[in-house]
Amino acid sequence: MPKIKKTENYFTQPGVANIGLSKEDIKTSFLEKLFYSLGRIPVVATKNDFYTSLALTVRDRVFRKYVKSLEQYVEEDARGVAYLSAEYLPGPHLGNNLLNLEIMEETREALAELNLNLDEILNEEVEPGLGNGGLGRLASCYMDSLATLGIPSIAYGIRYEFGIFKQEIQDGWQIESTDKWLHNRNPWEVIRPEISFEVKFGGHTEHSRDQDNKLHIEWIPGTEIKGTAFDTPILGYQSNAIILRLWKAEATESFDFAAYNLGDYYRAVEKKMRSENITKVLYPNDENLSGKELRLKQQYFFVCCSLKDIIRLHLLQGRKLETLHEKFTIQLNDTHPSIAVAELMRLLVDVHQMGWEDAWKVTQNTFAYTNHTLLPEALEKWPVNLLRNLLPRHLEIIYEINSRFITEIREKDFSGEQISRMFLIDDRGEPTVRMAHLATVGSYKVNGVSALHSGLLQEQVLKDFAQLWPKKFTNVTNGITHRRFLAVSNPRLAALISENIGKDWLTQLDKLKGLEPFAANKDFRSKWMQVKLENKKNLATHIKELTGIEIKPEMLLDIQVKRIHEYKRQHLKVLHILSLYLQIKKDKQNTVPPTAFVFAGKAAPGYFMAKRIIKLITSVGDLINNDPEVNGTLKVIFLPNFSVKLAQHVYPGADLSEQISMAGKEASGTGNMKFALNGALTVGTLDGANVEIREEVGEENFFLFGLTTEEVADKKKQGYHPYKIYSENENLKRVIDFLISDELTKGDPELFRSVYDNLLNQDPYLLLEDYQSYVDQMENVYKVWQDPEKWAQMSILNVANMGKFSSDRSIKDYCEKIWKVGAVKV
Ligand code: RUG
C-alpha cells in the first residue's frame, strides 16, 4: 500500500464525515449524531440526548486535531513527555472544547435554530471527579497547556468507575455517597481494546543462573489482571490535542480459564469482580492510606500499564530501549506513581534483559518527580510486608537500589545519622518504604510547586538529598489555565478585557499587564464592577438553588473554597465570623458591611476534625441566618459538593479570597490564583504561592496577616501556649467560649468540645496566635470595601498582574528547567 503521509488526504476523501466548523456544519453533524449515533428524533430526545449529540459532534473535531498532532509528533520523531498522575479533575469538557475550537457562537446559533439553548445543554454535563482537589486539577490544567503549547505528550491515569464521593449536607453534617459519573455514559472517551496489558500481583520470585552464570529472576505471580486503555482527547487553544489515557481493570481470560474448566462458574465470576475492583473507586486523601492494599494495587496497576505502553510506543518507532530516556521523560505527579522506579527497572532488567547499571542509567534519566506536600502524614510510606505480599520482585529491587545508593553515599561526607535518614527503608517501628526517597533517588530532577515550598523541601524533608545532589532540585511554581478559569467561566470579564486590550492574553497571559493603566480610569472601573455585580447575581442564584439561602448580590462575598483541613484553617474564619456576630449582638449596632461568607469543600470521610468543622460552619450558619438581628448584615453559606463545575460559578462572583493556611503548610494552592484572576482581592498568609501572588500584584493590593514560616518554627521551638493567648484576649475568649455555648450547640455541649479542647490545648495550626492579626486585617478589608473606587482599582491591578500564574508559564518552565522538550505545533 502506498504510504499516505498527510492526514489531509483522508479528510478530503468524498464521504468522509463532515467536520467543518461553520454553523451549518455543526447543525448537520449535531442532527446526524442525534439520529444515527443515538437513534433519536428531537421531539422525544432528552436534554441528555442533546448534550451527547453535541459532545460527539465536538469530539469528532477534537479528534481531527489529535490525529494531526500525533502524525506530526511521529513524523518529527519528537522527544515527548509522559505525565503519570493518579488523579485528574478535568471539569466539564464541552464548553472548554468549544472555546478552544473557537466555535462557541456558531454552536450557540446552530442550536438556537433548532430551538435549543446552549447554556442549558452545557449544564447537562456530569464532570469526571477523578481527583481529590488541587493536585488533580493541576494535572488537568497542565494538559490544557501541554496541548496549547504543542508539547508532544500523553497523560496516564486511572479510570475510576466512581470518582470523588458526592457530598450532601444533612442536618449540617457531611454525608457521602458514590459518584456515578459514568451513569449517562461518557461521550468523550474511546475504548482501545487492543491497547491492554497484563498486570501481576503477589506470588514469589525464582532466581536461577544460566550456563554463562548470568542471573535470571522470574516473578511467579499469584494473580494477574488486565488493564485496558480508555482515551479522551484534550484539545489546546487554537492548537494541538493530546490524549488522556486512563486504565480500567478487568479480569484476564487465562486466569478465569482454570475455574471455568472446573465448571466453577461462580468462582470465575468472583475473580472477575475482584479484578475489576481495582479501578472501582478513588480514595479520598487526608487519611492514613498506608495499610490500604487496594490503593497500592491501584498505583502499581496504572504504573505498570503506562510503562508498558510507553515501551510499546518507543519500540514501535524502531528504537532501542537503551535510548528510552532520550525520547521520553516521565513526570511523576507526587509519589502516587513512584513505584514506577522499581517497575521500570524490573521491565528493563528482568523482561528486556538489560544489565542493572544500564537499566539504572535509563531509569534515573527518565523520571522527574514533583513533590506536592511537606505534611509528614501525607508523605507516602508503604509497609514492607504489604509490598512483599503484593509486589515481591519490586521489594527486592527497592532493597537493591537502597543498598547500592547507601554504598555510594558512604563514600561521601555524610554522618551516620544523615545516611540512616536517607535510607529508602524506614525501619523504626514497622518497616516501611519511603516513597519520596525512592522517587528522589530514581529521578533526574525533583521540584516543589512554589518558591517557598521548593525552598522548604530542600531545607527540611529532602535536605540530605539536596546536599548530595544540589542540581537535582528546582522549583516550578504552579499555574492554572486562564482559558478555563477566565475565558470559559467568566465570559463577561473576558469580553471586557478583550474589548480594551485585545485577545492576545488568551495565549500570553502577561498581556493582561495592559490593563494596568485602566485602573485609573473611572469609567472602566465602573464597567469592571458592573461585570462583577452580574457575576455575583449569577452566584447568588446558584446559592439559592443549592441551599435555599438568599443573599443580596451587593453584599461583600467573602469566600473560602477548598478541601476542609485543619491546616487550611476554615475554623479561623469561623472564629472571625463569630467575633462579628457577638460584636453586633453586644453593641446592638454594627459597623460591619453586609457580608456573605461562603464556604465549600469536602472533608475526607475518616477525618473526624474536618467533618466537625463542616458541622461548625453549618451550625454558625443556622444561628446567624435565622437571627433577624444580624441576618441583614451577615450570612453564612456552605455550598455542598464542590466541583470544578461549581467552582466556575464561584470564582467569578468572589470579592474576597480567603487563603489563610498556617505558613509553611500549603505547598502552593491554586484556588488563590483562580480567585485573583477573576478580580477577587486576597486576605492571606505568607504561605505557598500567596507569597508570589503578593509579589506580583504588589503588597498594597494584598491583605496580609499572620506569622511567617520562620516565626511559626520559632514559636513552636519556644513552646507555644494557646491557653495564655486565650486568657489574655477578651474578644477571643468570648469567641472560643461561644463554641461550647448552648446557643450554638443547642443543648449538646459535646458537639464542638473537641474543637474547643484542641484549640486551647494544642492548637497545632496556631489559630489563636494568628487570630488578632487576622481580625485586624479584616478591619482593613472592610475599610477598603467601603471605598468602592479603591476596591475596583485594586481588583483591576490584581488581574493585570496575574500573568505569571498561567499554566502555560509553568509548562514552559517544566520544558526548560526539567524536560528539555520542545514544541511541535501543527
Ligand atoms: O496541597 C497541595 C496544594 O497546596 C497544591 O497547590 C496542589 C497542587 O500542587 O497539590 C495539593 N496536594 C498535595 N494534593 N495532594 C497533595 C499530597 O499528595
Image (cartoon, rainbow, N blue to C red):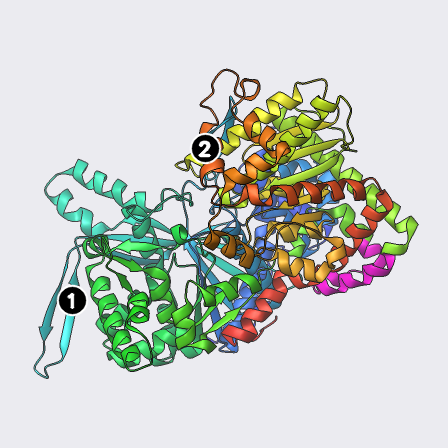
- Nearer to me, 167 or 430: 430
- Nearer to me, 442 or 353: 442
Q: Position of residue 224 (x, y in %)?
A: 22, 53
Residue at image position (33%, 54%) is: 227
Dominant SS of magenta comes to helix
**Ligand 1 has an atom within 8 Å of the beta carbon of the residue at disc 1:** no
- Disc 2 marks a residue whose amino acid type is Asp
Q: In the rendered view, would you say 641 is above or below 196?
A: above
**Element at label 1:** strand
Q: Position of residue 123 (x, y in %)?
A: 63, 37
Q: Which mark is residue 218?
A: 1
- Mark 2 or 1 closer to N-term? 1
Which residue in the protein does label 2 denote? 757
Residue at image position (58%, 73%) is: 823
**Mark 1 surroundings: few (<14), some (14-19) or many (≥20) residues within 10 A:** some
Residue at image position (65%, 40%) is: 559
Q: In the rendered view, would you say 538 is above or below 630?
A: below
| 246 falls in the magenta region | no
Q: Which residues are magenta?
A: 497-518
